[in-house]
Amino acid sequence: IDKMSARTAMLKEEVAALQEALAKLAQSQAEMNKIRSEEKSAFETNSAEMKRGLEGVKLALKVLREYFAKEDKAHASAEGAGTGIIALLEVVESDFTKGLSQMTADEDSAQAAYEAQTKENEIEKATKDQDVKYKVKESTDLDKTVAESTSDRASVQEELAAAQEYLSKLHGQCDEKAETFEQRKARYEA
């Protein structure tokens, strides 16, 4: 009974520790969800701005190329400056494209890491939930067994006490008792 009681207490402590770990895991997952949501929102906003900027640069390049490609010589004196501006805009376009690609790659890797960690957390949660379930069941079964054993022991002890009392009465009635010297002397003198 004592071993079962000790095992029950140990199981209850383990269940409490598991539940605390589950609470921390849930809190961690909620915080991760919040951070991921913020990152995704920031990516969507920044990505949209970057795409609009890239489209603007492409449009400016198209307009400038069309303008300087005309046969009209009104711009002949500014052609060198136009070529410089076009080159600068091409560099800006390249930087925007690289930036957008980097942002997309970062977002994809962050999303993959988030999904992997979430999956790992789900597995850990399921494992700990099952541990809690089985330990609570075992603890409940042990508590029931301890209660039954304690009740059985109390019943057996009552029966033992009754049997010992009856045995002592039988000894009083049935056992031959040797007469003491005083009893023999008193009987002899009488």
Image (cartoon, rainbow, N blue to C red):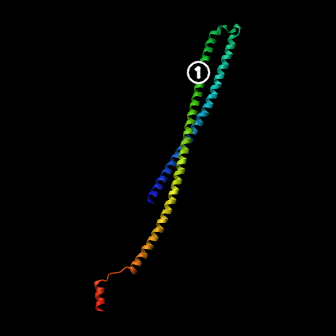
Residue occupying the point 28% across, 88% down:
185
Residue occupying the point 49% across, 65% down:
152
In this orientation, which residue lies closer to the viewer: 59 or 135? 135
The answer to whether 132 is drawn above or below residue 70 in the figure is below
Residue occupying the point 31% across, 89% down:
187
Q: Amino acid at mark 1?
A: Asp
In this orientation, which residue lies closer to the viewer: 138 or 99? 138
The image quadrant where one finds the N terminus is bottom left
**Residue underneath mark 1:** 95
Residue occupying the point 51% across, 48% down:
18
Residue 45 coordinates in the image, percent (x, y): 63, 31
The image quadrant where one finds the C terminus is bottom left
The mark tally for this picture is: 1
The quadrant holding residue 41 is top right
The answer to whether 144 is drawn above or below residue 170 in the figure is above
The answer to whether 14 is drawn above or below residue 172 in the figure is above
Residue 171 coordinates in the image, percent (x, y): 39, 78
59 with respect to 113 (left or right) = right
Residue 48 coordinates in the image, percent (x, y): 64, 28
Q: Identify the secondary structure beneath mark 1.
A: helix
Residue density around tag 1, few if under 14, some if 14–19, many if 20 or more, within 10 Å: few
Residue 114 coordinates in the image, percent (x, y): 56, 36
In this orientation, which residue lies closer to the viewer: 48 or 168? 168
